[in-house]
Image: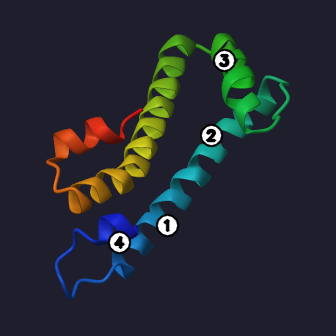
Amino acid sequence: MVTYGSYLPRGRTLLGPAVAIVAGDTAFAIVAGVMIFPAVFSFGLDPAGEPALAFVTMPQVFAQMPFGRAFGAAFFGLLAAAALTSAISLLEVVVAFLMERWRLGRPHAVLGAAP
C-alpha cells in the first residue's frame, strides 16, 4: 500500500482504497470458504491445511464432480493469477526504488529487479 500510495496525487488518502481492499479480500475469502469446505466435506475428504487443501484435496474433489476438469482448470488458473499479481506487487517496491534512485526506466528497472 505504501508503494502504490506513492503514485496517488497529493491530498488523496489511502483510507478508502484500503477499506475497499480489506472488504473485498474478506468477502472473497468467505465466499471461497463457503464453496470449498462443503465440497470437501460432501466427498468425505480431509480439510487439511492450506497447501494440502489446494494441491491434494481440491484435485480429488474436482476428479469426483461433474465438469471437474473445467472447474479444476478455472480454480488453478485463478490461483496462479493470484500468485502472479502478488509477486508483481512485491516486485513493485524494488522497481520503484530502482526507478527513483538510479533514474531507470520501468523496463530496465523490472529487468534489474526480476530474478
33 lies left or right of 67: right
Please give the residue where the numbered disc 2 appears in the rendered image: 35
| Marks 4 and 3, the one that precedes in the sequence | 4
Nearest-to-viewer mark from 2 and 1:
1
Residue 90 point in image, percent of width and height:
43, 50
Residue identified by numbered label 4? 17
Q: Quadrant of residue 50?
A: top right
Task: Name the residue at 23% across, 83% down.
Answer: 12
CA distance separating discs 1 and 4? 9 Å
Reading the image, the residue beneath label 3 is: 59
Query: Residue beneath label 1, please?
Result: 22
The amino acid on which the numbered mark 3 sits, given as a three-letter code, is Pro
Q: Is residue 12 above or below residue 31?
A: below
What is the secondary structure assignment of the residue under circle 2? helix
Depicted 99 relative to depicted 48: above or below = below
User: Residue 6, how many percent across, how many down?
Assistant: 27, 71
Q: Name the residue: 21% across, 88% down.
A: 11
As measured in the structure, the alpha-carbon distance from the residue carrying label 3 to the one carrying label 1 is 29 Å
Please identify the quarter of the rendering in which residue 37 is found. Answer: top right
The kind of secondary structure element at disc 1 is helix
Q: Is residue 20 left or right of residue 55?
A: left
Residue drawn at x 58%, y 52% is 29
Name which of mark 2 and mark 4 comes first in the sequence: 4
Q: Amino acid at mark 4?
A: Pro
Query: Residues at badges 2 and 4 in contact (C-beta under 8 Å)?
Result: no
- Residue 53: x and y, percent? 73, 31
Q: Amino acid at mark 1?
A: Val
